[in-house]
Amino acid sequence: MKLIQELNQRYGIRNIGYVFRNLSPAYLVETSIRRGEGFLASNGALCVRTGQRTGRSPQDRYIVEGSPYHDKIDWGKRNVLISKATKDKLYQAIRVDLQNHDLFIFDGYAGAKKAHRIPLRVIAVKAWHALFSHHLFVRPTEEDLETFQPEWTIINCADMEAPQLEELNSKVAVVADLSEKVIYIIGTAYGGEMKKIIFYICNLLLPEKNILSMHCSANVGSAGDVAILFGLSGTGKTTLGADPDRQLIGDDEHGWDDEGVFNLEGGLYPKYIRLQKESEPMIWNSTTFGSILENVIVDEKSRTPDYNDVSITENTRGAFPIHYVSGALTEGIGGHPNNIFFLTCDAYGVLPPISKLEQGQAQYHFISGYTAKVAGTEVGIVEPQADFSNCFGAPFLPLSPAVYAKMLGEKIAQHKPCVWLINTGWTGGPYGVGSRIKIAYSRAMINAALRGDLDQVEYKLDPIFNILVPQSCPNVPREVLDPKSTWSDKGVYDQQAKALAEKFRRNFSRFSDVDYLVQYGPK
């Protein structure tokens, strides 16, 4: 009764059904099945469907006018302003829609480190969304819940459609009211919208505390050495970060403060398309009872998942808490990184598979964030497309990319990690002609860098991209290290490489406030 009164007073939500708070995963699985939200696969995972939207909807995200952060936000196509009047109309529609609904609440945190964690609440109409939140955010203790007060709230109305309003693009809307600290998700059941909008909030708040928020995975070796791997979805951030010889800190979102790195999440949300036990045992073994499978096709009779089936989407996903991962560093806190890897999926097939970057080059490539958007992660993406995603996470950045690049440069100068650019994309030709670089080779290159095997090898300056390329690497054929040698037509390679270099230059011309970094880019 007390919780219902709080929903009335704090959010204006009235005339609702039952309210459930922080239910156990087993209870939420049972409830989801009973309500027809999902069914069990043969491995015990809960299978759910997200409807028409099977990926994020970045064109449908909005920031409400009049917030105290207005002058700090980098307004543009990724940060779109809407009026309070439009927000009020949406909120009124939400309150009407929630009437007579049972509600599922998760109270928890963003941030493994208590000094910086952000208290948050998820109010959902779907039980599996509460289960998703339990997995992906930091779970509270029973003692935490006794005095818990949310600072930020997500109200997830996945089943309703946004009303036709002039400022909206579609029937989907993800609206952040930074003044009221409330986020509304309307018209999409895709679980990733919840985790990424909170990451967006972390990217807004943490830099104020001199904490660099990062779209990266992180792990730690037996000697305590920390590695972080930046990259957008599909670049191998989770796969390569899940090293069986190292403890996983987290696979997607981290902060870097004066003491080291820490996970912003409590679980993992990896892609499952073409998943194989041999190449990705961590994900395979963690998919068990309590896990969620999003849009994964299963056999009707045996309920065995078919991870190769793309009939719904390429962007099949799963979610599970980090303690499902054998040997993971569940407290989610590590020291300062010894190695930093930028993972790029080069659709042109011309970037070297590994190169070493000095501080200025690291800032240049960080702010450039060159990669390819991989099929399914956003609406309308059906095959890889070359893209520059600032800081390897542009859709999640409210501030200017220069803010994050400056902080990264300061931390590199202070802690002196080795920085590497890793191309996990194509070789021997562009997408459609060449082939994807083998995961085994990418893993061997990263392991060689972690062990220090590349410290004394010969390096050669790439004349086009202005980066140092090692001429040998254990367990990697020499010719693989030189992308030009993998092309049958060397002249076409030169044309493609110069074309990509020009794209780098044109992209970076947008950042006049960091034009001193141009010297570290392609020539």
Image (tube, rainbow, N blue to C red):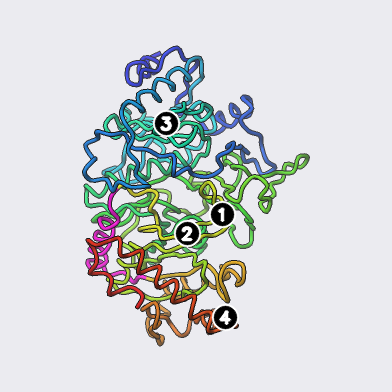
Mark 3 or 1, closer to the camera: 1
Residue at image x 49%, y 75%? 496
Q: In the rendered structure, which segment of residues is drawn in magenta?
A: 399-419
Select label 3 or label 4 by which is in front. Answer: 4
Mark 2 falls on what kind of element?
helix
Can residue 481 be spotted in the picture? Answer: no
Tell which circle, 3 or 4, labels the residue nearer the N-terminal end: 3
Mark 2 or mark 4, whichever is nearer to me:
4
Residue placed farthest to the bottom in the image? 458
* Residue 237 circle label: 2
Amino acid bearing label 3: Val
Disc 2/disc 3 C-alpha distance (Å): 27 Å
Q: Residues within 10 Å of mark 2 (few under 14, many from 20)?
A: many
Q: Which residue is mark 3?
A: 122
282 or 172, nearer to the observer: 172
473 w.r.t. 56: above or below: below
Q: Are marks 2 and 4 in contact (CB under 8 Å)?
A: no
- Crowd rating for badge 3 (residues with CA inside 10 Å; few <14, some 14–19, many 20+): many
Asked if the residues shown at circle 3 and circle 4 are in contact, with their CB atoms under 8 angstroms apart, the answer is no
Q: Which residue is mark 1?
A: 375
- Vertical order, 86 against 333 (above or below): above
Q: CA distance from mark 3 to mark 1?
A: 29 Å
Q: CA distance from mark 2 to mark 1?
A: 16 Å
Residue 12: x %, y % from top left: 36, 17
